[in-house]
């Protein structure tokens, strides 16, 4: 395995002794993405069969100290600006094109919108980004779409989108049954769809979809068609910026959760392109 591949594979949500912020080289971000883990307690309202978070070990901490979060991000921004980050493995293996700071992403070990202080976290990071003159650096929310219409989350989304923001929202299914099987959430699938539609009516959204082989089979043709119909409905009701299709890329606690074959991902991408002309589609076969 080459050094370059190692850099792409290393998406650990930890960095030295930091508790909240971490750097990764992301193909989806096309460069450096600085993550903000708002769920060090590993709290999530989904229990996806493909989740890589180890919930068998104790959480490092259960609170979010916004002052410490801001300090950690300031250090990472300076390490990236100075180039010192790229003298540290595995980032020293990144080529010149990957050393561009693309975004700061709210993600981590759970669902970031479950944090009550979510708007204040966005506010802190947006202000820090502005102070450092990083207007071109995006603020990204990576979300399971379950709480997009909560009042405090709408406040946070407004701040995010006012500061070069993007919303990357999960949609892994086309039917309630498949959603229950793969995402294993108590949140009704209808709420996910309603939240996506209401958000897309207000701001452009990027749909993130992980399809996989689960218990020896990929999604059925009927499931794929139902998924495509969900995308059509969302596009009719709002703005879809793009679709990102990917699959399992790293070991998961569920041994029956396996990568979908590249040809099947390509077939899904072709279905999106045919069914929703003009909608950009990106496919990621490995770590994204």
Image (tube, rainbow, N blue to C red):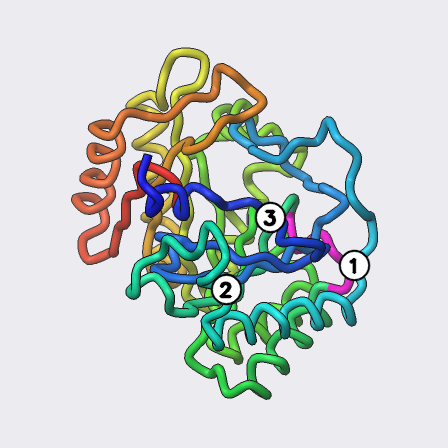
Residue 22 point in image, percent of width and height: 59, 57
Instruction: Determine the CA span between mark 2 and mark 1.
Output: 24 Å
Q: How many marks?
A: 3
**Label 2 crowd bin: few (<14), some (14–19), many (20+), radius 10 Å:** some
Q: Residues within 10 Å of mark 1 (few under 14, many from 20)?
A: some
Q: Is residue 116 magenta?
A: yes
Q: Residue at x 41, y 57 (%)?
A: 92
What residue does disc 1 label? 64
Magenta region: 111-117
- Give the mark nearest the N terminus, 2 or 3: 3
User: Who is closer to the viewer here, 192 or 138?
Assistant: 138
**Mark in the foreground, 2 or 1:** 2
Q: What residue did someone put label 2 on?
A: 85
Q: Is residue 74 above or below residue 6?
A: below
SS class, disc 1: loop
* Percent of width and height locating residue 27: 35, 52
Label 3 sits on a secondary structure element that is loop
In the orientation shown, which residue stands out farthest toward the front? 87
Q: Residue at x 44, y 62 (%)?
A: 86
Question: Residue at point 52% right, 66% down?
Answer: 104
Q: Quadrant of the N terminus?
A: top left
Can you give x and y, in whole percent of width and height, for residue 253 in the image? Answer: 58, 23
Q: Sequence-wise, which precedes: disc 2 or disc 1?
A: 1
* Number of residues whose C-alpha sits closer than 10 Å to that of mark 3, classed few (under 14), some (14–19) or many (20 or more): many
Q: Position of residue 83 (x, y in %)?
A: 45, 71
Q: Nearer the viewer, mark 2 or mark 3?
A: 2
Q: CA distance from mark 2 to mark 3?
A: 16 Å
Q: Is residue 160 left or right of residue 228?
A: right
- Residue linked to disc 3: 13
């Amino acid at each position: 395995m080459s050094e370059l591949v190692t850099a792409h594979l290393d998406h650990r949500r930890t960095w030295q002794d930091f508790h909240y912020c971490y750097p990764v080289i992301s193909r989806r971000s096309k460069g450096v993405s600085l993550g903000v883990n708002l769920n060090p307690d590993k709290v999530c309202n989904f229990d996806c069969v493909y989740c890589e978070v180890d919930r068998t070990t104790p959480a490092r901490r259960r609170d979010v100290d916004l002052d410490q979060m801001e300090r950690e991000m300031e250090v990472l921004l300076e390490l990236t600006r100075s180039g010192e980050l790229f003298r540290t493995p595995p980032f020293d293996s990144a080529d010149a094109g990957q050393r561009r700071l693309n975004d700061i992403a709210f993600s981590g070990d759970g669902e970031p919108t479950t944090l009550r202080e979510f708007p204040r976290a966005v506010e802190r990071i947006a202000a820090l980004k502005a102070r450092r003159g990083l207007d071109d650096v995006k603020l990204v929310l990576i979300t399971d779409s379950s709480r997009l219409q909560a009042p405090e989350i709408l406040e946070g989304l407004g701040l995010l989108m006012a500061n070069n923001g993007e919303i990357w929202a999960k949609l892994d299914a086309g039917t309630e049954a498949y959603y229950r099987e793969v995402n294993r959430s108590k949140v009704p699938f209808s709420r996910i769809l309603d939240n996506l539609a209401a958000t897309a009516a207000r701001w452009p959204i990027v749909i993130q979809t992980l399809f996989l082989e689960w218990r020896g089979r990929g999604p059925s043709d009927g499931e794929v068609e139902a998924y495509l119909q969900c995308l059509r409905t969302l596009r009719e009701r709002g703005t879809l910026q793009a679709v990102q299709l990917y699959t399992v890329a790293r070991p998961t606690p569920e041994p029956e959760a396996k990568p979908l074959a590249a040809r099947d991902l390509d077939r899904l991408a072709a279905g999106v392109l045919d069914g929703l002309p003009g909608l950009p589609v990106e496919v990621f076969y490995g770590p994204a």
